[in-house]
Image (spheres, rainbow, N blue to C red):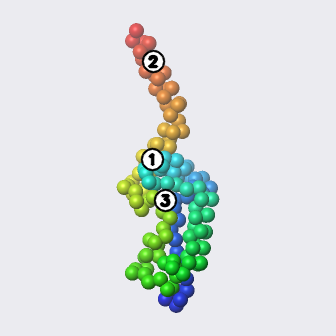
Amino acid sequence: ARAKGVTVSMNIAPASATASVVSNKTFALVYGGMHVFKPMEIFYQEVSNSVMAALMLHDIMNPMSPASPGYKLQNPFHLLIQSAFHGGSMRCLYQTKSVGEVAALVSLWIKYSVFITITLLSVITGFWMRAM
């Protein structure tokens, strides 16, 4: 379509905490701890929607946008690279699939750290009291 003079808006959206995604408990746990792996960021659906709409308007309205047929691309994949809103996943030291388990553990710790700490303290003090 671009070769025929049509503007092609093709942008990458970041990982977004939509209702359908976080209804899956595994995704909810992983997304809850992903912020530990900077610059990785999980966005709320409203933020993703707003930014993606702004990128589409930019592509349509700006004749200097890579989406414009007049803009010379070295490679068709540059359409994806130039305006990618990836949430840090392209700059992160780790791949998303390699940090999922740790992110889920971080999320569980954030959610249950008080309960775990109190339980551990009661177990430790219980052993200490029996030793005396």
Disc 2 or disc 3, which is closer to the eye?
A: 3
- Side of 123 where 62 appears, left or right: right
Near mark 1 (Cα within 10 A), the count class, few <14, some 14-19 or many ≥20, is some
Q: Quadrant of the C terminus?
A: top left
Which residue in the structure is indicated by mark 2? 125
Residue 51 seen in the figure: yes
Secondary structure beneath dot 3 equals: loop
Please report the residue visible at 57 percent of the width from the left and 73 percent of the height from the top.
Answer: 58
Measured Cα–Cα span from mark 3 to mark 1: 13 Å
Along the line of sight, the residue nearer the viewer: 15 or 108: 15
Please report the residue visible at 43 percent of the width from the left and 81 percent of the height from the top.
Answer: 73
- Side of 132 where 113 appears, left or right: right
Which residue in the structure is indicated by mark 3? 87
- Give whichever of discs 3 and 1 has the lower sequence position: 1
Which residue in the structure is indicated by mark 1? 36
Q: What's under tag 1, amino acid-wise? A: Val
Secondary structure beneath dot 1 equals: helix
Measured Cα–Cα span from mark 2 to mark 3: 44 Å
CB under 8 Å between discs 3 and 1: no
Residue 80, placed above or below residue 3: above
Residue 74, placed above or below residue 94: below
Along the line of sight, the residue nearer the viewer: 52 or 127: 52
In the image, residue 53 lies at what x, y percent?
A: 61, 69
Residue 5, placed above or below residue 87: below
Q: What's under tag 3, amino acid-wise? A: Gly
- Give whichever of discs 2 and 1 has the lower sequence position: 1
Near mark 3 (Cα within 10 A), the count class, few <14, some 14-19 or many ≥20, is many
